[in-house]
Image (cartoon, rainbow, N blue to C red):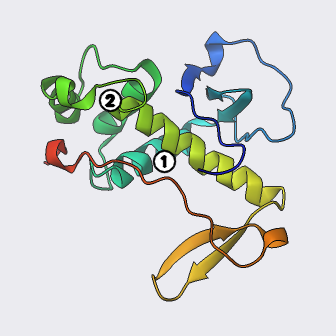
């Protein structure tokens, strides 16, 4: 667990439904289309940034492969924002409704929770890099990128392992 990383369920709101507040230090901002609140942090995203982050979170969780169609991404965004898909507009949306029991669980174990958590974590890390609190490094041995705290030495920060939803993944 990273220092200062909140442990509660993030909330995603369509920006038009919330009162705009001033950005405080530590809040990620790429636009005003979507707002994610997590603890006392409030991150705002433009539509493209949020869409890319939600798709990448679903890929990381093993639920989809990259390159969703417009309708599939729309359903996934609706799921991330609303916590459900009432009227699916794609086969992905239908798949989610058919596997709903497998995707839900206690608040911090559900697929929606992890979608939001990974979107938040990515923006939180990006903001820390922007503020100079973290640096990005390449691990030659693992062939992956990671983060270090430059004032604490070269040890890579271990991010919390996310669960996998591969067994109920959406496949075309």
Q: Residue at x 32, y 54 (%)?
A: 67
Instruction: Where is residue 146? Give x, y as percent.
Output: 59, 70
Q: Is residue 46 left or right of residue 83?
A: right
Of residues 50 and 128, the one nearer the viewer is: 128
Q: How many marks?
A: 2
The crowd level at tag 2 (other Cα within 10 Å; few <14, some 14-19, many 20+) is many
Q: Is residue 139 left or right of residue 171?
A: right
Q: Between marks 2 and 1, how big is the CA–CA gap?
A: 13 Å
Q: Is residue 94 left or right of residue 52?
A: left
Instruction: Where is residue 36? Give x, y as percent.
Output: 61, 29
The crowd level at tag 1 (other Cα within 10 Å; few <14, some 14-19, many 20+) is some
The residue to which callout 2 is attached is 75
Q: Secondary structure at mark 1?
A: helix
Q: Residue at x 50, y 53 (%)?
A: 160
The residue to which callout 1 is attached is 52
Q: Is residue 78 left or right of residue 122?
A: left
Where 97 sits versus 58, above or below? above
Instruction: Where is residue 95? Give x, y as percent.
Output: 16, 32
Do residues under tags 2 and 1 come within 8 Å of each other at their CB atoms? Answer: no
Of the numbered discs 2 and 1, the one sitting upstream in the chain is 1
- Image disc number at residue 107: none
Quarter of the figure with residue 170: top left
Instruction: Where is residue 5? Give x, y as percent.
Output: 66, 42
Q: Residue at x 15, y 29 (%)?
A: 99
Q: Secondary structure at mark 2?
A: helix
Where 124 sits versus 12, above or below? below
Quarter of the figure with residue 88: top left
């Amino acid at each position: 667990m990273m220092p200062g990383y909140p442990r509660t369920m993030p909330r995603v709101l369509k920006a038009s439904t919330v009162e705009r507040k001033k950005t405080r230090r530590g809040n990620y901002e790429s636009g005003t289309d979507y707002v994610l609140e997590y603890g006392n942090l409030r991150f705002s995203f433009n539509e493209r940034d949020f869409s890319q982050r939600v798709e990448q979170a679903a890929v990381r969780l093993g639920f989809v492969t990259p390159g969703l169609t417009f309708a599939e991404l729309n359903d996934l965004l609706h799921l991330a924002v609303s916590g459900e898909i009432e009227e699916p507009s794609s086969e992905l949306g239908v798949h989610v409704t058919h596997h709903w029991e497998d995707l839900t669980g206690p608040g911090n174990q559900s697929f929606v929770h992890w979608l939001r958590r990974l979107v938040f974590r990515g923006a939180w890390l990006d903001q820390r890099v922007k503020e100079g609190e973290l640096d990005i490094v390449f691990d030659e041995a693992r062939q992956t990128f990671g983060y270090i705290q430059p004032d604490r030495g070269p040890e890579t920060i271990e991010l919390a392992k996310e669960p996998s939803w591969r067994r109920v993944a959406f496949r075309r």
